[in-house]
Amino acid sequence: MFRHLLVPVDGSDASIEALGQAVEFAQSIGARITFCPLPAERTASCPEAEAERCTQPADGETTWELLARAEAAARAQGVPCSLAAPGVDAAPIGAAARAHGCDLICVAPRPLVPSSGISEYGTGTVAVDGGGIAVLTCAIDSRPAVAQAIRILLVGQRTLAAHLHGALRAARMARGPDLARQAEYQATCKATTLHEIAGRLSELQKSQHHSMTEALFARLRAHTSAVDAELDELERQHQRAIQMFDDLARLIARGDESAATGGMLEEGLRACAQFTWENMGRKEGVVLPAARRYLSDKDWNVLAEEFAAWSTDKSPRSPTL
Protein backbone atom coordinates (compact mmCIF):
# COMPACT_ATOMS: atom_id res chain seq x y z
CA MET A 1 0.00 0.00 0.00
CA PHE A 2 1.26 3.45 -0.85
CA ARG A 3 2.27 5.59 2.11
CA HIS A 4 3.72 8.81 0.69
CA LEU A 5 2.47 10.62 -2.43
CA LEU A 6 4.28 13.29 -4.45
CA VAL A 7 1.77 15.68 -6.03
CA PRO A 8 3.10 18.28 -8.48
CA VAL A 9 1.05 21.50 -8.67
CA ASP A 10 1.08 24.24 -11.29
CA GLY A 11 -2.24 26.06 -10.83
CA SER A 12 -3.84 24.85 -14.07
CA ASP A 13 -7.43 23.58 -14.06
CA ALA A 14 -6.25 19.99 -14.60
CA SER A 15 -3.68 20.28 -11.81
CA ILE A 16 -6.33 21.59 -9.40
CA GLU A 17 -8.64 18.67 -10.20
CA ALA A 18 -5.80 16.16 -9.83
CA LEU A 19 -4.84 17.72 -6.49
CA GLY A 20 -8.37 17.18 -5.18
CA GLN A 21 -8.32 13.54 -6.29
CA ALA A 22 -4.88 12.96 -4.79
CA VAL A 23 -5.93 14.41 -1.44
CA GLU A 24 -9.04 12.21 -1.31
CA PHE A 25 -6.98 9.16 -2.29
CA ALA A 26 -4.38 9.89 0.38
CA GLN A 27 -7.13 10.27 2.97
CA SER A 28 -8.71 6.96 2.00
CA ILE A 29 -5.47 4.96 2.36
CA GLY A 30 -3.93 6.89 5.27
CA ALA A 31 -1.04 8.28 3.22
CA ARG A 32 0.76 11.59 3.46
CA ILE A 33 1.55 14.03 0.63
CA THR A 34 4.48 16.15 -0.44
CA PHE A 35 3.51 18.94 -2.82
CA CYS A 36 6.01 19.94 -5.48
CA PRO A 37 5.59 23.21 -7.43
CA LEU A 38 6.11 23.00 -11.16
CA PRO A 39 6.98 25.75 -13.63
CA ALA A 40 3.65 26.83 -15.14
CA GLU A 41 2.84 28.53 -18.42
CA ARG A 42 -0.31 29.72 -16.63
CA THR A 43 0.44 31.47 -13.36
CA ALA A 44 -2.14 32.61 -10.83
CA SER A 45 -2.69 35.58 -13.14
CA CYS A 46 -4.45 35.15 -16.46
CA PRO A 47 -5.79 37.20 -19.38
CA GLU A 48 -9.31 37.04 -17.94
CA ALA A 49 -8.04 38.89 -14.89
CA GLU A 50 -7.24 41.89 -17.09
CA ALA A 51 -3.85 41.88 -15.44
CA GLU A 52 -1.27 44.44 -16.45
CA ARG A 53 2.40 43.62 -16.21
CA CYS A 54 2.34 45.04 -12.67
CA THR A 55 -0.02 42.29 -11.47
CA GLN A 56 2.18 39.43 -12.64
CA PRO A 57 3.60 37.71 -9.56
CA ALA A 58 7.28 36.99 -9.16
CA ASP A 59 8.29 33.32 -9.33
CA GLY A 60 8.63 33.09 -5.55
CA GLU A 61 5.16 34.55 -5.03
CA THR A 62 3.62 32.10 -7.48
CA THR A 63 5.23 29.21 -5.62
CA TRP A 64 4.01 30.63 -2.29
CA GLU A 65 0.46 30.82 -3.63
CA LEU A 66 0.46 27.32 -5.16
CA LEU A 67 1.86 25.63 -2.08
CA ALA A 68 -0.37 27.54 0.37
CA ARG A 69 -3.45 26.47 -1.58
CA ALA A 70 -2.28 22.86 -1.82
CA GLU A 71 -1.42 22.65 1.88
CA ALA A 72 -4.84 24.09 2.83
CA ALA A 73 -6.58 21.52 0.61
CA ALA A 74 -4.77 18.65 2.32
CA ARG A 75 -5.20 19.90 5.88
CA ALA A 76 -8.93 20.50 5.32
CA GLN A 77 -9.22 16.76 4.61
CA GLY A 78 -7.00 15.79 7.55
CA VAL A 79 -4.14 14.63 5.31
CA PRO A 80 -0.60 15.18 6.65
CA CYS A 81 1.47 17.07 4.11
CA SER A 82 4.77 18.80 3.53
CA LEU A 83 6.08 21.17 0.89
CA ALA A 84 9.02 20.63 -1.44
CA ALA A 85 12.09 22.57 -0.35
CA PRO A 86 13.26 25.47 -2.56
CA GLY A 87 15.21 24.13 -5.50
CA VAL A 88 13.59 20.69 -5.54
CA ASP A 89 10.84 21.94 -7.83
CA ALA A 90 13.39 22.36 -10.64
CA ALA A 91 14.39 18.68 -10.48
CA PRO A 92 12.74 15.95 -12.57
CA ILE A 93 9.60 14.63 -10.90
CA GLY A 94 11.10 11.19 -10.30
CA ALA A 95 14.17 12.69 -8.64
CA ALA A 96 11.98 14.88 -6.44
CA ALA A 97 9.94 11.83 -5.42
CA ARG A 98 13.07 9.91 -4.42
CA ALA A 99 14.46 12.91 -2.54
CA HIS A 100 11.32 13.03 -0.39
CA GLY A 101 10.91 9.29 0.05
CA CYS A 102 7.68 9.09 -1.96
CA ASP A 103 6.38 5.80 -3.33
CA LEU A 104 3.69 7.17 -5.70
CA ILE A 105 3.52 10.23 -7.97
CA CYS A 106 0.04 11.62 -8.68
CA VAL A 107 -0.13 13.85 -11.76
CA ALA A 108 -2.66 15.52 -14.02
CA PRO A 109 -2.70 14.63 -17.72
CA ARG A 110 -0.18 16.87 -19.44
CA PRO A 111 -0.43 18.03 -23.06
CA LEU A 112 1.98 16.55 -25.57
CA VAL A 113 4.89 18.90 -26.27
CA PRO A 114 6.78 18.15 -29.51
CA SER A 115 10.39 17.04 -28.98
CA SER A 116 9.85 16.88 -25.24
CA GLY A 117 11.57 13.53 -24.97
CA ILE A 118 8.71 12.15 -22.90
CA SER A 119 6.81 9.13 -24.14
CA GLU A 120 3.27 9.57 -25.42
CA TYR A 121 0.58 7.52 -23.67
CA GLY A 122 -2.60 8.97 -25.09
CA THR A 123 -3.92 11.38 -27.66
CA GLY A 124 -2.44 14.79 -27.02
CA THR A 125 -0.90 13.82 -23.68
CA VAL A 126 2.44 12.59 -22.39
CA ALA A 127 3.44 10.03 -19.78
CA VAL A 128 5.51 11.21 -16.84
CA ASP A 129 8.76 9.34 -16.18
CA GLY A 130 8.71 8.42 -12.51
CA GLY A 131 12.28 7.15 -12.55
CA GLY A 132 11.24 3.76 -11.18
CA ILE A 133 8.51 5.16 -8.91
CA ALA A 134 4.86 4.37 -9.71
CA VAL A 135 2.90 7.15 -11.45
CA LEU A 136 -0.85 7.61 -11.17
CA THR A 137 -2.37 9.87 -13.83
CA CYS A 138 -5.61 11.28 -12.46
CA ALA A 139 -8.69 11.13 -14.67
CA ILE A 140 -10.23 14.48 -15.59
CA ASP A 141 -14.01 14.97 -15.55
CA SER A 142 -14.89 15.38 -19.21
CA ARG A 143 -18.50 16.53 -18.79
CA PRO A 144 -18.72 19.84 -20.69
CA ALA A 145 -21.04 21.57 -18.21
CA VAL A 146 -18.80 20.62 -15.27
CA ALA A 147 -15.69 21.87 -17.05
CA GLN A 148 -17.38 25.12 -18.05
CA ALA A 149 -18.82 25.91 -14.61
CA ILE A 150 -15.59 25.14 -12.76
CA ARG A 151 -13.50 27.01 -15.32
CA ILE A 152 -15.57 30.16 -14.73
CA LEU A 153 -15.23 29.75 -10.96
CA LEU A 154 -11.46 29.37 -11.25
CA VAL A 155 -11.25 32.42 -13.52
CA GLY A 156 -12.88 34.37 -10.69
CA GLN A 157 -10.28 33.07 -8.24
CA ARG A 158 -7.44 33.98 -10.60
CA THR A 159 -8.86 37.47 -11.03
CA LEU A 160 -8.70 38.03 -7.28
CA ALA A 161 -5.24 36.44 -7.10
CA ALA A 162 -3.94 38.67 -9.89
CA HIS A 163 -5.08 41.82 -8.12
CA LEU A 164 -3.64 40.62 -4.83
CA HIS A 165 -0.26 40.06 -6.46
CA GLY A 166 -0.55 43.49 -8.07
CA ALA A 167 -1.31 45.11 -4.72
CA LEU A 168 1.66 43.38 -3.11
CA ARG A 169 3.97 44.58 -5.84
CA ALA A 170 2.55 48.08 -5.67
CA ALA A 171 3.10 48.17 -1.90
CA ARG A 172 6.71 47.06 -2.29
CA MET A 173 7.41 49.57 -5.04
CA ALA A 174 5.69 52.42 -3.21
CA ARG A 175 7.91 52.12 -0.16
CA GLY A 176 11.07 50.75 -1.77
CA PRO A 177 14.23 52.91 -1.81
CA ASP A 178 15.06 51.92 -5.39
CA LEU A 179 13.92 54.88 -7.50
CA ALA A 180 14.52 52.93 -10.72
CA ARG A 181 12.12 50.21 -9.57
CA GLN A 182 9.53 52.83 -8.64
CA ALA A 183 9.86 54.40 -12.09
CA GLU A 184 9.47 50.96 -13.70
CA TYR A 185 6.33 50.35 -11.64
CA GLN A 186 4.81 53.68 -12.63
CA ALA A 187 5.62 53.07 -16.30
CA THR A 188 4.26 49.52 -16.44
CA CYS A 189 1.22 50.02 -14.24
CA LYS A 190 0.19 53.28 -15.88
CA ALA A 191 -2.39 55.02 -13.71
CA THR A 192 -2.93 52.12 -11.32
CA THR A 193 -2.53 53.18 -7.69
CA LEU A 194 -2.72 51.35 -4.41
CA HIS A 195 -6.03 53.10 -3.75
CA GLU A 196 -7.48 51.81 -7.04
CA ILE A 197 -6.20 48.29 -6.41
CA ALA A 198 -7.63 48.27 -2.87
CA GLY A 199 -11.00 49.37 -4.21
CA ARG A 200 -10.92 46.65 -6.81
CA LEU A 201 -10.07 44.01 -4.20
CA SER A 202 -13.02 45.09 -2.06
CA GLU A 203 -15.30 44.96 -5.11
CA LEU A 204 -14.10 41.47 -6.00
CA GLN A 205 -14.98 40.21 -2.54
CA LYS A 206 -18.60 41.23 -3.18
CA SER A 207 -18.72 40.41 -6.89
CA GLN A 208 -20.68 37.96 -9.00
CA HIS A 209 -17.94 35.42 -8.28
CA HIS A 210 -19.24 35.15 -4.72
CA SER A 211 -22.79 34.76 -6.05
CA MET A 212 -21.56 31.83 -8.12
CA THR A 213 -19.92 30.29 -5.08
CA GLU A 214 -23.13 30.69 -3.08
CA ALA A 215 -25.11 29.02 -5.86
CA LEU A 216 -22.70 26.07 -5.87
CA PHE A 217 -22.84 25.80 -2.08
CA ALA A 218 -26.66 25.88 -2.09
CA ARG A 219 -26.94 23.05 -4.60
CA LEU A 220 -24.36 21.01 -2.71
CA ARG A 221 -26.26 21.46 0.57
CA ALA A 222 -29.44 20.30 -1.17
CA HIS A 223 -27.78 17.00 -2.12
CA THR A 224 -25.65 16.16 0.92
CA SER A 225 -24.77 17.24 4.45
CA ALA A 226 -21.31 15.66 4.20
CA VAL A 227 -19.56 19.00 3.66
CA ASP A 228 -21.89 21.31 5.59
CA ALA A 229 -19.25 22.10 8.21
CA GLU A 230 -16.73 23.01 5.52
CA LEU A 231 -19.24 25.20 3.69
CA ASP A 232 -20.09 26.98 6.95
CA GLU A 233 -16.41 27.65 7.58
CA LEU A 234 -15.83 28.94 4.06
CA GLU A 235 -18.76 31.33 4.36
CA ARG A 236 -17.39 32.58 7.69
CA GLN A 237 -14.00 33.06 6.04
CA HIS A 238 -15.58 35.09 3.26
CA GLN A 239 -17.06 37.54 5.75
CA ARG A 240 -13.69 37.77 7.48
CA ALA A 241 -11.96 38.44 4.14
CA ILE A 242 -14.34 41.32 3.40
CA GLN A 243 -13.46 42.85 6.76
CA MET A 244 -9.72 42.42 6.15
CA PHE A 245 -9.86 44.09 2.73
CA ASP A 246 -12.04 46.91 4.05
CA ASP A 247 -9.46 47.52 6.82
CA LEU A 248 -6.70 47.71 4.19
CA ALA A 249 -8.74 50.13 2.08
CA ARG A 250 -9.14 52.42 5.08
CA LEU A 251 -5.39 52.27 5.74
CA ILE A 252 -4.65 53.22 2.14
CA ALA A 253 -7.26 55.98 2.19
CA ARG A 254 -5.41 57.70 5.05
CA GLY A 255 -2.79 58.75 2.53
CA ASP A 256 0.02 58.32 5.05
CA GLU A 257 3.16 57.56 3.06
CA SER A 258 5.43 56.93 6.04
CA ALA A 259 7.66 53.88 6.07
CA ALA A 260 5.79 52.51 9.08
CA THR A 261 2.46 52.74 7.27
CA GLY A 262 4.02 51.20 4.16
CA GLY A 263 5.28 48.29 6.25
CA MET A 264 1.88 47.84 7.88
CA LEU A 265 0.24 47.86 4.46
CA GLU A 266 2.53 45.24 2.98
CA GLU A 267 2.19 43.07 6.09
CA GLY A 268 -1.60 43.39 5.93
CA LEU A 269 -1.65 42.52 2.24
CA ARG A 270 0.46 39.43 2.86
CA ALA A 271 -1.91 38.33 5.61
CA CYS A 272 -4.87 38.86 3.25
CA ALA A 273 -3.09 36.92 0.51
CA GLN A 274 -2.28 33.99 2.80
CA PHE A 275 -5.87 33.93 4.04
CA THR A 276 -7.15 34.04 0.45
CA TRP A 277 -4.83 31.26 -0.80
CA GLU A 278 -5.95 29.01 2.07
CA ASN A 279 -9.62 29.72 1.34
CA MET A 280 -9.10 28.87 -2.33
CA GLY A 281 -7.26 25.69 -1.43
CA ARG A 282 -10.10 24.48 0.80
CA LYS A 283 -12.58 25.00 -2.03
CA GLU A 284 -10.31 23.15 -4.46
CA GLY A 285 -9.58 20.27 -2.08
CA VAL A 286 -13.02 19.77 -0.51
CA VAL A 287 -15.85 21.60 -2.26
CA LEU A 288 -15.07 20.97 -5.93
CA PRO A 289 -14.45 17.20 -5.49
CA ALA A 290 -17.67 16.92 -3.47
CA ALA A 291 -19.59 18.87 -6.10
CA ARG A 292 -18.32 16.56 -8.85
CA ARG A 293 -19.44 13.57 -6.79
CA TYR A 294 -22.86 14.71 -5.54
CA LEU A 295 -24.29 17.11 -8.12
CA SER A 296 -26.30 15.77 -11.04
CA ASP A 297 -25.81 16.61 -14.69
CA LYS A 298 -28.94 18.77 -14.44
CA ASP A 299 -27.34 20.75 -11.60
CA TRP A 300 -24.19 21.31 -13.61
CA ASN A 301 -26.11 22.38 -16.71
CA VAL A 302 -28.00 25.00 -14.70
CA LEU A 303 -24.83 26.19 -12.94
CA ALA A 304 -22.91 26.46 -16.20
CA GLU A 305 -25.66 28.58 -17.74
CA GLU A 306 -25.97 30.80 -14.65
CA PHE A 307 -22.21 31.25 -14.30
CA ALA A 308 -21.82 32.14 -17.97
CA ALA A 309 -24.54 34.79 -17.62
CA TRP A 310 -23.23 36.14 -14.31
CA SER A 311 -19.67 36.41 -15.62
CA THR A 312 -20.83 39.03 -18.13
CA ASP A 313 -23.67 40.60 -16.12
CA LYS A 314 -22.96 43.07 -13.32
CA SER A 315 -26.52 43.10 -11.93
CA PRO A 316 -26.97 41.31 -8.59
CA ARG A 317 -28.73 37.96 -8.56
CA SER A 318 -29.78 35.48 -5.91
CA PRO A 319 -28.75 31.80 -6.03
CA THR A 320 -31.44 29.53 -7.45
CA LEU A 321 -32.16 25.85 -6.93
Image: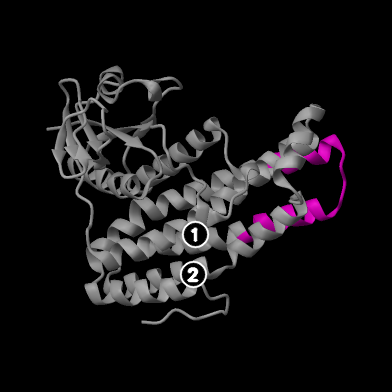
Number of callouts: 2
Asked if the residue under mark 1 is in contact with the one under mark 2, i.e. CB atoms within 8 Å, the reply is yes
Q: Residue 247: tell me if it is visible.
A: no
Q: Position of residue 149 (x, y in %)?
A: 36, 66
Q: How is the image coloured?
A: one colour
Tell me the residue that label 1 is attached to: 156
Mark 2: which secondary structure?
A: loop
Which is the main secondary structure of the residues drawn in magenta? helix
Which of the pair 122/265 is nearer the observer?
122
Where are the magenta residues, as a range? Answer: 242-267
Looking at the image, residue 78 sits to the left or right of residue 318; the answer is: left
Identify the residue shown where x is 23% and y is 25%: 117
Expressed as whole percent of the image width and height from the top left, the position of residue 248 reads 72, 52
Residue at horizontal 49 percent and vertical 55 percent from the top: 157
Is residue 140 visible in the rendered image? The answer is yes
Query: Residue 220 appears in which quarter of the rendering?
Result: bottom left
Element carrying mark 1: helix
The amino acid marked with disc number 1 is Gly
Residue placed furthest toward the front: 114
Q: Nearer the viewer, residue 279 or 130?
A: 130
Expressed as whole percent of the image width and height from the top left, the position of residue 108 reads: 26, 42
Q: Earlier in the sequence, mark 2 or mark 1?
A: 1
Q: Is residue 248 left or right of residue 72?
A: right
Residue 56 is marked as: none
Within-10-Å neighbours for mark 1: few <14, some 14–19, many 20+: many
- Under mark 2, the amino acid is Ser
Q: Position of residue 205 (x, y in %)?
A: 59, 62
Quadrant housing the C terminus: bottom left
Above or below 295: residue 130:
above
Is-magenta flag for residue 308?
A: no
Which residue is under mark 2? 311
Circle 2 crowding by C-alpha within 10 Å: few under 14, some 14–19, many from 20: some
